[in-house]
């Protein structure tokens, strides 16, 4: 059974940092690009970042570029999102997911809530 | 960036109704589009990929069509479990962009 389990969310003050993790199991993690998607409370979905299987290609949304860093450890089947200089508008649920261009593959975690507030 | 304009933003429908949701891309995206369903408190679930290919395990009452800039998700006969919010997503080029969502509510 495929599982993606996010962790690391929580309450942080503006300007603070958090590191999200996503533990993958049940599929060949090292063969897949991976993606972070977020959702502000009551709002729609927003793509945040993607990383290729070998970490050779990395992409960020303009809204997080320069503040967030995506990485992965294929030996540990894990994906990470280091979030620095957090702002109130970064508040939301963060999902790790398989990318949308792998045919029938569609894997999502349950999400982890990040709240940026003083 | 490619903008995805989704309509309507919400609709009310009855069980058994035929429902159509549209996404328009600001430039051509071939068929690099997926449709997702999201229920409150849950992760999104993809229904359609490649604009018209049904994800495995998804009921056949869901269908997708379109190519280029105009895309449609159709639910042929709305069921109680289909009341949810639906999103399109283009992945023709970075950044991938979602439509604004369509909330399907019970009439």
Image (spheres, coloured by chain):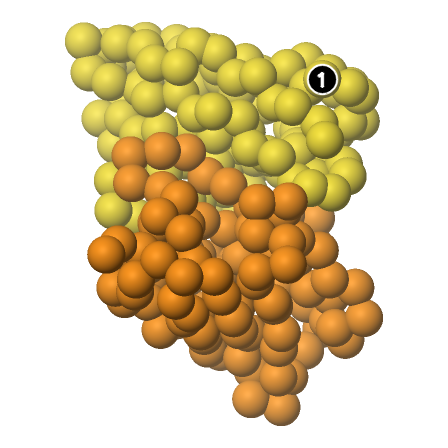
| Residue A67 drawn at (x, y percent) | 57, 60
| Residue A93 drawn at (x, y percent) | 35, 52
| Residue B19 drawn at (x, y percent) | 40, 11
* Chain B rendering hue: yellow
Quarter of the rendering occupied by the N terminus of chain A:
bottom left
Chain of the residue where label 1 is placed in the rendered structure: B
| Residue A95 drawn at (x, y percent) | 44, 57
* Chain A rendering hue: orange
What element does badge 1 sit on? loop
For disc 1, the marked residue is B26
**Residue A75, picture quadrant:** bottom right
In front: B86, or B95? Answer: B95
For this view, does B91 lie left or right of residue B63?
right
Q: Residue at x 68, y 19 (%)?
A: B25
Image: A111 above or below B31: below
Q: Residue at x 30, y 29 (%)?
A: B84
């Amino acid at each position: 059974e495929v599982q993606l389990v996010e962790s690391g969310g929580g309450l942080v003050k503006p300007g603070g940092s958090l590191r999200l993790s996503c533990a993958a199991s049940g599929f060949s993690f090292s063969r897949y690009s991976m993606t972070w998607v977020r959702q502000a409370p009551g709002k729609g979905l927003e793509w945040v970042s993607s990383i290729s299987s070998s970490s050779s290609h990395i992409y960020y949304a303009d809204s997080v570029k320069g503040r967030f860093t995506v990485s992965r450890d294929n030996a540990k089947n894990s994906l990470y999102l280091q979030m620095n200089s957090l702002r109130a508008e970064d508040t939301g649920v963060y999902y790790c997911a398989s990318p949308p261009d792998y045919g029938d593959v569609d894997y999502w975690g349950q999400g982890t809530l990040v709240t940026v507030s003083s | 960036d490619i903008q995805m304009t989704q309509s309507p933003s919400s609709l009310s429908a009855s069980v058994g109704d035929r429902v159509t949701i549209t996404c328009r891309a600001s430039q051509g995206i071939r068929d690099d589009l997926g449709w997702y369903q999201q229920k409150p408190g849950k992760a999104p679930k993809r229904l359609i990929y490649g604009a018209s290919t049904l994800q495995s395990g998804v009921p056949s009452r869901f269908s997708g069509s379109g190519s280029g800039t105009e895309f449609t998700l159709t639910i042929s006969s709305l069921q109680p479990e289909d009341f949810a919010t639906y999103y399109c997503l283009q992945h023709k080029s970075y950044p991938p962009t979602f439509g604004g969502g369509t909330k399907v509510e019970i009439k």
